[in-house]
Image (tube, rainbow, N blue to C red):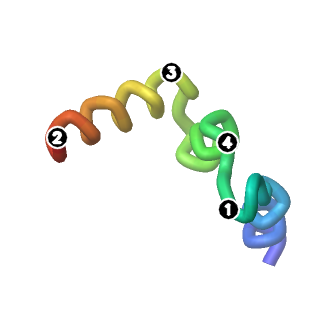
Amino acid sequence: MQIIQSIQNRIYEIRGERVMLDKDLAALYEVETKALNLAVKKKYKTFS
């Protein structure tokens, strides 16, 4: 239950959308923010 609460505390509402910051996602996956952003960019290129 504590893990769920921790994740819920990192979800923000911006302009009516629920979002998580890259630094919070990186902490959740236990990677550096830079590595997470790089992986997202590489994945995005495969769909373009």
Instruction: Name the spot of residue 41 as percent of width and height, x first.
Output: 33, 31
Label 4, on which residue? 21
Q: With respect to residue 17, does 32 lie above or below?
A: above
Screen quadrant of the C terminus:
top left
Q: With respect to residue 36, does 3 lie above or below?
A: below
The residue lying at 38 percent from left, 25 percent from top is: 38
The residue type indicated by label 1 comes to Glu
CB under 8 Å between discs 3 and 2: no
Front tag of 1 and 3: 1
* Few, some or many residues within 10 Å of mark 3 (<14, 14–19, 20+): few
Is residue 8 visible in this depiction of the protein? yes
The residue lying at 79 percent from left, 78 percent from top is: 1
Label 3 secondary element: helix
Label 3, on which residue? 34
Q: What is the number of callouts on the image? A: 4
The residue type indicated by label 2 comes to Ser
Residues under labels 3 and 2: Cα distance?
A: 21 Å
Instruction: Name the spot of residue 12 as percent of width and height, x first.
Output: 78, 56
Residues under labels 1 and 4: Cα distance?
A: 12 Å
Instruction: Name the spot of residue 42 as percent of width and height, x first.
Output: 26, 31
Instruction: Name the spot of residue 9 as percent of width and height, x first.
Output: 84, 60
